[in-house]
Image (cartoon, rainbow, N blue to C red):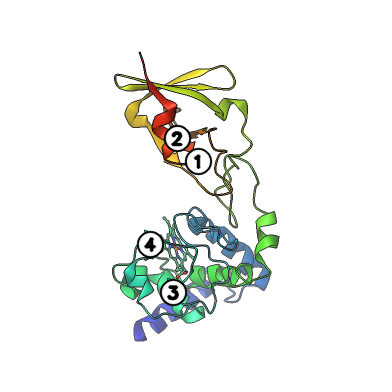
Amino acid sequence: MMRERLTLVIAIVGGISISGAPALSADVNLNRGQRAFGACAACHSLEPDRNMTGPSLAGLWGRKAGSLPSFERFSDALKSSGIIWDDRSLDGWLTDPDRMVPDNEMPFNGIKDARDRAELLAFLKEATKPDAAPQRTAQAPMGGMGGMMGGGGREPNLKSLEPNMQVKAITYCHDSYRVATADGKTRHFWERNLRLKTDSSQEGPQSGAPALVPAGMMGDRADVIFAAPVEISKMIEERC
Ligand code: HEC
C-alpha cells in the first residue's frame, strides 16, 4: 500500500518536471493508452470471445478473474485468485502480475510507470465496455499481414487466401519440406523452420485448404496452418 502511493507521487512529480503540467486531457490519455495497448494486442483481443494466447478482454470490468467460459487455458492460480477485475485490481495486475498472482501464466513483466498504466486502463475501460468493442475493432487494420498492433488487431482471415498462400501439396524428403502453392511456386524449408499449426476458429483455413504464412524476417521460416490435426499427416507426402 505504502509502496503504491510512493510510486504514484514520484510519477506525478516526474510529470511536472518534464511537461510542466501534471494533468493530460482525456483525449491525449486515451490515444496514448490505445498505443500502449499495442503491448497487449498480440495476445488479447477486445472482441467478445475472440481468444488468442490470452483471453478476450471484452467486458473485463466486473468480471471474476479466470472465469471467461470460452477461454480454456487459464492457470489454476488465476482461477482460484478470487480477484474481481476493477480499476484497482487491474492496476495491481499490470504493475507486476507475478507479485499479485504467483504462478499465473501471463508472459508479461508489468508496466512500472503509474501514468502509463493509468492511460492504458483509461483506454481499456472504454474499449472493453460491452457496446464499445465493434467500434474499436473497426479502426484496426483489417486483412493486412501487419495487423498485430492497435486495438484488437487482426491476422488475415485464412478462409480467403491469396494464391501464394494457398497450399496445394507438401512433400517431405530427408530434412526438408517442399510446399507447393496455388500460384504455381514451390518453396523449400528446412524442417526446423516450418511450423505446422492448426486453427479451428472462424479465421482459420477452410478444411482441406491449409495456408502458408510467412514467419520471421528472413524469409526462411513459415507456418502452415491447417483446419484440423487430422489433415497434417494426410497432406504431407514422404517423397524425394
Ligand atoms: C504474451 C502474451 C500476453 C501479453 C503480451 C499480455 N497478456 Fe494478458 N494474459 C495472457 C495470458 C496467457 C493470460 C491468462 C493467464 C493465466 O491464466 O494465468 C492473460 C490474462 C490477462 C488478464 C486476466 C483476464 C481474465 O479474464 O481473468 C488480463 C486483465 C490481462 N491479461 C491483461 C493484459 C494487458 C492489459 C496486457 C498488456 C499490458 C497484457 N495482458 C499482455 C497473455 C498475455
Type of amino acid at the residue the image marks with label 4: Met
Type of amino acid at the residue the image marks with label 2: Glu
Ligand 1 has an atom within 8 Å of the beta carbon of the residue at disc 2: no
> Against 210, is 24 above or below?
below
Ligand 1 has an atom within 8 Å of the beta carbon of the residue at disc 3: yes
On the image, numbered disc 2 is attached to which residue?
231
Q: Element type at marker 4?
A: loop
Ligand 1 has an atom within 8 Å of the beta carbon of the residue at disc 1: no
Which quarter is ligand 1 in? bottom left
| Sequence-first tag of 2 and 3 | 3
Distance between the alpha carbons at the discs numbered 2 and 1: 7 Å
Type of amino acid at the residue the image marks with label 3: Ala
Q: Residue at x 39, y 31 (%)?
A: 233
Mark 2 in CB contact with mark 3 (< 8 angstroms) = no
Q: Where residue 48 sits: x, y (%)? A: 59, 63
Mark 4 in CB contact with mark 3 (< 8 angstroms) = no
On the image, numbered disc 1 is attached to which residue?
227
